[in-house]
Amino acid sequence: MGNGKAIQWFPGHMTKAKREMEASLKLVDMVIELRDARIPFSSSNPMLKKMINKKPYLIILSKKDKADDFLTKEWTDYFNNQEISCISMDLLKDNVIKLVKDEVHKIMKPWIERQKSRGINPRAIRVMVTGIPNVGKSTLINRIAKRKIAKTADKPGVTRSLQWIKLDKDIDLLDTPGILWPKFEDEIIGLNLAIVGSINDDILDLERISVYALKKLIKNYPQFLIDRYNIELEEDPYIFFEKLGRSKGLLRRNEVDYERCYKFFLTEIRNDKLGKITWEKVNEENNK
Ligand SMILES: Nc1nc2c(ncn2[C@@H]2O[C@H](COP(=O)(O)OP(=O)(O)O)[C@@H](O)[C@H]2O)c(=O)[nH]1
Ligand SMILES: [Mg+2]
């Protein structure tokens, strides 16, 4: 389970990641933050906004192919209504280069105009990509570079040499992403990150994750569950997992093996077997 490369964050890592981020920030004119479209709130970093201060900023909601289209629209509207640029993307299939460079040009237009009005011939716009682990930073950079370069160890604090990739004739992209930690303080955030497979399962309890996911699905996507498993939905989540275990033969000595049920269920969710799901809504109580 999990992606096997989840980072365990310790205070030392965070300090170092923050320092590296600040060093990179000094070099760039604009920041792109990647977030997972399935959890646009939980996949953000608590310090980024303060760190980037007033630099132009773009949020890209990645993995939109896995998220609920209706809610993705709500989330992009939500940010755009606060004057925060936000677009959604399937980083594997969309025309990433065109989408990103058009957006960068749009956002940086006032900067270009300002330079021109001062009689300065604008130099290339410098951009960096940042985000928590597993949001698609390397995928985005690799697609822009059209080669496998972002292969540096995916850990904060690994010494690196910075290089620039041409995104367009007048846009340079830093080849190394800023890696930041998610918000840990809230258990719901940890659960959301676990559901989409962005933190190690063993940090959290499989049962807790699965029961939370099931309750959310019963509330927001009941038809997905019914269509996939043909199980009548009940109040008690254990009855659901009992029935799921029996129907899928997830047994041990003729008894339902709950551990296997949870793993099965979470794998189904992560592989989009139930459908395109978004786990948090705009203005939900926990999106503080
Ligand atoms: N379906 C889908 N998968 C994506 C997308 N973007 C990234 N991925 C996958 O998500 C995983 C993590 O991506 P990666 O670029 O390594 O994330 P990083 O940790 O932020 O560098 C990889 O398996 C990617 O193939 C996307 O838009 N759609
Ligand atoms: Mg990476």
Image (spheres, rainbow, N blue to C red):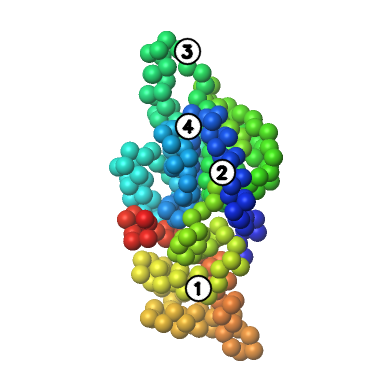
Per the model, the C-alpha gap separating discs 2 and 1 is 31 Å
In the picture as drawn, the residue positioned furthest to the top comes out as 119
Q: Amino acid at mark 1?
A: Arg
Residue 73 is at least partly visible in this image: no
> Mark 1 or mark 3, which has the lower sequence index?
3
Q: Which residue is mark 4?
A: 30
Q: Tell me where residue 263 appears, x and y as whole percent.
A: 58, 71
* Neighbours of disc 1 within 10 Å: few (<14), some (14-19), many (20+): few
Q: Residue at x 42, y 60 (%)?
A: 279
Q: Which residue is mark 1?
A: 208
Q: Which residue is mark 2?
A: 18
* Neighbours of disc 3 within 10 Å: few (<14), some (14-19), many (20+): few
Q: Tell me where residue 61 appears, x and y as whole percent.
A: 45, 46
* Neighbours of disc 4 within 10 Å: few (<14), some (14-19), many (20+): many
> Mark 2 or mark 3, which has the lower sequence index?
2
In the picture as drawn, the residue positioned furthest to the left comes out as 81
Residue 280 is at least partly visible in this image: yes
> Mark 3 or mark 4, which has the lower sequence index?
4
Q: Assess whether mark 3 and mark 1 are in contact (beta carbons under 8 angstroms).
A: no
* Neighbours of disc 2 within 10 Å: few (<14), some (14-19), many (20+): many
* Ligand 1 has an atom within 8 Å of the beta carbon of the residue at disc 2: no
Element marked by disc 3: loop
